[in-house]
Amino acid sequence: MSAPRVSVIVATHHRPRLLERAVASLLSQSFADFELLIVDDASGPETGRLISMLMASDERVRGLRCEQNQGPAGARNKAVAEARADLCAILDDDDLCLPHRLERQVAVFNSDPEVDLVCSPVQWVDGFGERLAIWPGVLSRGELPDDPQDVFRLLYLESNKIPNTTLMVKTEWLRRLPYPEDLRVGEDWFAFMQMAASGARFRCIAEPLVLQLRAGDHPSLMAEKAHAFRDQRKVLAKIAAWLEAQGLKEHRALHRRAESNQRVREARFFGGREGLRLAGSALAYQPSNPAAWAQLQHLLARGGKKVARTLRG
């Protein structure tokens, strides 16, 4: 049997109904030369039955199972090790591919063999399928840099701008730089920074190729923001250590700005006293960071208005 052009990887954990929808969006793609690797990350028997049914109905589907929960990074890495294609695509089990997603991405690789990774923005949808915002703006505006070092700088300073669920990448990159399994949030961000710092060439299709569920009651790792922020700080510390180990010392100057910007993002989210503390921490990391000064001034102005309202009342 000849190898397929693309290995599509879907990791899943206890979400059979959503998984069934995600798989249906893949099996109806306009591009058909792919294998679908579904990794059951220690789910219950309902998920196993669904995967068996899918395998029986379409020979492109292959089921893998983790007997103990590995998290999204470990589950995807298991599938990458089994992938038969030179290209790997990722889809999260609660998202939907638009019908031409694989075709559009493969066309980019066919037109430019030097490209290593192709992504797109996502169209957020609510639980009723109503379309919300398109994220991130830098991709939808076609502003992803061409130079890998500029991509690295963007990701390091501004957090992750590559929706992992839209990823198509040369398999060799995921084998060389697998997802870090000690992270449950930000594992994709770390991997993308590694790739960019190592010279991978990124390309973006500016139109959304994936519908991403953003329902208010939808369980998500990002729902617990405090936990997510802790992991994002771990990502920054981890990438700084990796850069040093690789001898990429020219990136040292970026680290304090990256740490400062991270705390600015946290200050924007929390506001109030915690926001003021975080803005101060951002300035301690880099006193010249204009974003930190702007956030501190914004919070002080809001606090002053609140005091004034209290005194008038």
Image (cartoon, grey):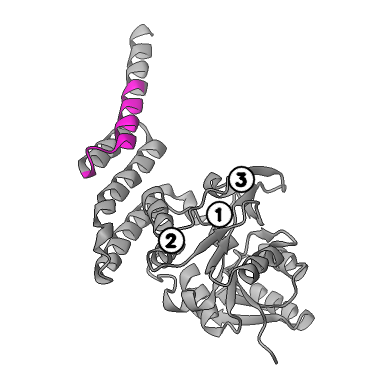
Residue beneath disc 2:
148
Tell us which disc is closer to us: 1 or 3. Answer: 3
Q: Residue at x 41, y 51 (%)?
A: 154
Task: Tell me which segment is drawn in magenta.
Answer: 285-301
Query: Which quadrant of the view contains residue 212?
Result: bottom right
Residue 102 coordinates in the image, percent (x, y): 68, 67
Residue beneath disc 3:
134
Q: Is residue 237 left or right of residue 45?
A: left
Kind of residue at badge 2: Pro
Count the labels in the image. 3
Q: Is residue 302 left or right of residue 77?
A: left
SS class, disc 3: strand
Residue furthest to the bottom: 1
- Mark sitting earlier along the chain (1/2): 2
How far apart are the two marked residues, 1 and 3, measured between alpha carbons?
A: 20 Å
Residue 274 appears in the rendering = no
Query: Which quadrant of the view contains residue 197?
Result: bottom left
Tell us which disc is closer to us: 1 or 2. Answer: 2
- Labelled pair 1, 3 in contact (Cβ < 8 Å): no
